[in-house]
Image (cartoon, grey):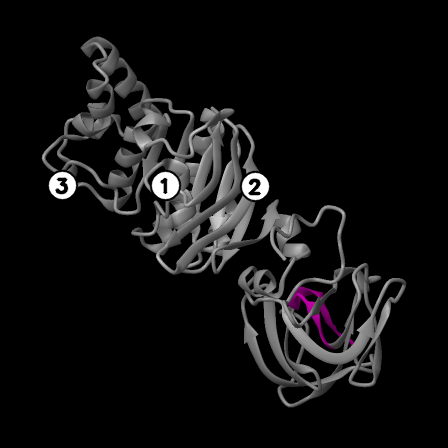
Amino acid sequence: MAQIRIENLRKEFGAFTAVQNSTFTIEDGEFFMLLGPSGCGKTTTLRMMAGLELPTSGRIYIDGEEVSQKRASQRDIAFVFQMFALYPHMTVRGNISYPLKSQGMPKARVREKVGEVAEILGITDILDRPVGGLSGGDRQRVALGRAIVRQPKAFFMDEPLGALDAEFREHMAEELRALHDRMEATTVYVTHDQLEAMQMGDKIAVMNHGVVEQFGVPQDIYDWPATKFVAQFIGSPPMNFLEFDGMIGAGHDEVRLNGVAVKVPEAIDGASGKLTLGVRPEHVKLDDAAPYRGRIVASEYLGTTRIVTLDTPGGVLKARIPSSEAVVVGQTTGLSFDARTLTLFENTHGHALRSHANAGVLAHG
């Protein structure tokens, strides 16, 4: 397998810039997620890495070799599409063996390798069936089998589970991650599903409008979002935003939230004017003794937890609390926050003001 390095990658389609100067490294054997909403540039980035699109500028290295202007057939990679892209007139065995036959591999060796892959994917019993009558899950396994049978340097997957129903999609996500771990493969996976990215990925690059807004391990991206976009896109419910007027600078660890003093992390980067305090719902505590107040306007029971919506002077806020904690809609309560869990943002570009030692990389300012 291989390390993949991206340097200042850019793609323009006429006057439209789909990808803006992305730079990141995917280490050998990582399961790497390209995450973002539709139109953010994640699929275009994947297609450039795979050689299906050539970059306008920038460089792509696979296993130390620059492949920026090489076509897909010259990169020793395998691509798995969302819609399976199988040959309907062939059997399962025929689909999986096709790449090996195209390389001129001896028949005995082809049969051996197809058998090995079918065993890994649990599809030995359907090898001689036509793919047309298979379930979506089995067809996805066949598509994966055709990709892994060549043992390429890297696997590129463009929302390969998107066509499956929710229950089976979760099951296949677990299988796909387990397959990756067995093969120790370098895998690049595109998705718009933040839960899928958090569940499966070793590293995540969060994209928006062609820009990599944050790059890092899932927990750092969740705990310490580099921008307001990342804070909103990751998490369900997303991070709460409470706006206030003020100034924050080096050495300051307190802000005034609608006249109430709130302890915050010490700011490394300073800003003034309209600022935003970010807090995850699970870090909002209902504390009647706290001076910052909110009125409960809704309560959603979710089994072990409850989502409480509150109207506060700084805006609507959601709290995730234990379902055993009693609340009354219409009641006013105090709200407290642990400074260690808060993030401060400036409002002009939406960037976080505090730099955390392991908070991932903000790729572009």
Crowding at label 1, few (<14), some or many (≥20) Cα neighbours within 10 Å? many
Task: Identify the residue under disc 3.
Answer: 132
- Membership of 277 in magenta stretch: yes
Judged from this view, the residue extending furthest toward the right is 251
Q: Which of the 4 quarters of the picture holds residue 141?
A: top left
Task: Identify the residue under disc 2.
Answer: 24
Give amino acid for label 1: Leu
Q: Which of the 4 quarters of the picture holds residue 267?
A: bottom right
Which element carries disc 1, helix, strand or loop? loop
Magenta range is 274-287
**Residue at horizontal 47 percent and vertical 56 percent from the top:** 210
Task: Identify the residue under disc 1.
Answer: 54
Judged from this view, the residue extending furthest toward the left is 89
Distance of label 1 from label 2 (alpha carbons): 18 Å
Can residue 170 be seen here? The reply is: no
Please state which of residues 226 and 349 is positioned toward the viewer in this rendering. 349
Crowding at label 2, few (<14), some or many (≥20) Cα neighbours within 10 Å? some
